[in-house]
Amino acid sequence: MVNFGFTISVTRAVEYDKNDKGCAEYVALRVPSSSACIGCGGCSATCTAGNLTEFNIRKIQMLMKRGENQLYKEQLHKCMLCGKCLTVCPRGVDTRGMILAMIEYMREK
Amino acid sequence: MSDKKHIVVIGGGPAGCVAAERLSRLGFRVSIVEKECELGGNLNNWDRLFPDGKRASEMVTKLVNDVKMADVAVWTDVEPIEAKRVENGFTILLSDKSLLFADAVMLTTGFAPFNAIRKEEYGYGIYRNVTTSVELENMIQAHIVPDTVSRVGMVHCVGSRDEKCGNMYCSKVCCITAVKQAIELKQMLPNAEIFCFYMDMRMFGPGYEELYREAQERYGIKFVRGRVSEASEDSEGRVAIKVEDTLVGRPMRMKLDRLVLMVGMEPSAGTRSVAELLGVKTKVNGFIQGGDPHIAANQTNVPGVFVAGTATAPMNSTDTLNDACAAAFQVANYLNG
């Protein structure tokens, strides 16, 4: 291919129609409380892993729901499963269960 | 003619009906002036009320019965065309040339839904699959939502909290209406995916937050925090939207079978014209300016002219009915001096 000295940038947009929502469907079934998230960020605020690394549990589960799996896959192992997030969630979401379900899904895949 | 003092209530929606009934029971002579052919106002164009799903028609029947039982004179198909301040009251000329004398006037002229054509970027009136929440309510009532619909997006704050259309205020009822209609849609179309695109979820009323949670947990409605910037139509008539999923921090694109615009409230044409007729002050947003917001909200700058319901600000039907009761007492205090 001729190199013209430029490339076309890939969109940063979440292409919802094309994305694979398999993990989202799996987590929705395994952890029904995940639907009640309102994105308040209480979980990430208290998260030990989140205070030391780029791990952002609130954002990860939102990316997962949109099918942006590449963006958080490498982050999942940073969770220490301490469960502090569970104690602050105002909507009773099983946040730790969500991380576990995501890890499980990725492993099976 | 009796020597009872006479109150003319302008506008026969929920606020007008309740204010008239209460004032009549307090011992005054009351007339309602309504420009449509029947009482009920915007409730006549609605199916079910949040948060309990009560039928709007049931509410109208109750209001109309209460008005009847209270011996209120009802003038329909007429509107005031002239109003004059005279000694101890007002004379009001109606469009059928009747002349009414009023010791006090109650303005309950209400709101009109925002005209979504003004938000051209959403394509209402241009793309066939873009509708308003009012039209959706009518479709739900008539059971004419096609079962081929598999994805619906509901845009909150259309005509509200938006300086681009001149409306800086929150219309208060659209968030909970979106939640209610999303649930109703899901009940009709169990396999459909339904998104609500919101700026803030304002679940202020009793039972609202609970209904929001039920929409998420029981019905799987998806709430995305972000304002849809624009819509376009593809060759099959589907609606492509652009929105930022602000909690993910990335723009998002998707196609929908239907885009529903949650239209806000604006002062009705009647509210604007009657304010002008009577020299009543309005706010920058066009709604009627009440008195002290804590203790005299139903008074206006014109002594003897009172206001209640959505003529003064957007509010839900519960608050409208309570506001009308409060206004009735303020009128009674004024007339009993």
Image (spheres, coloured by chain):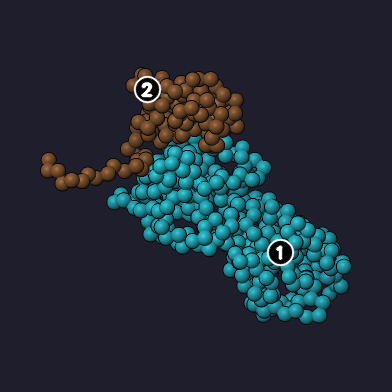
Chain colours: A brown, B cyan
Please provide percent x and percent y for residue B265. 57, 58
Q: Judge if badges 1 and 2 mark residues of a common chain.
A: no
In the rendered view of the protein, which quadrant contains the N terminus of chain B? bottom right
| Viewer-proximal residue among B91 and B160 | B160
Mark toward the viewer: 1 or 2: 2
- Residue found at x 78% / y 58%: B295
* Residue B316 visible (yes or no): yes
- Residue found at x 38% / y 53%: B231
Marks 1,2: beta carbons within 8 A: no
What is the crowding at mark 1: few (fewer than 14 residues within 10 Å), some, or many (at least 20)?
A: many
Chain for disc number 2: A
- Residue found at x 74% / y 64%: B291
Q: Which residue is tagged 1?
A: B290
Three-letter amino acid code at the position of disc 1: Gly
To which quarter of the image does residue B212 belong? top right
Q: Is residue B224 above or below residue A88?
A: below
Q: Is residue A72 above or below residue B51?
A: above
Q: Which residue is tagged 2?
A: A106
Is residue B56 found left or right of B148 in the rendered image?
Answer: right
Give the Cα distance between marks 1 and 2: 60 Å
Residue B36: give its label: none
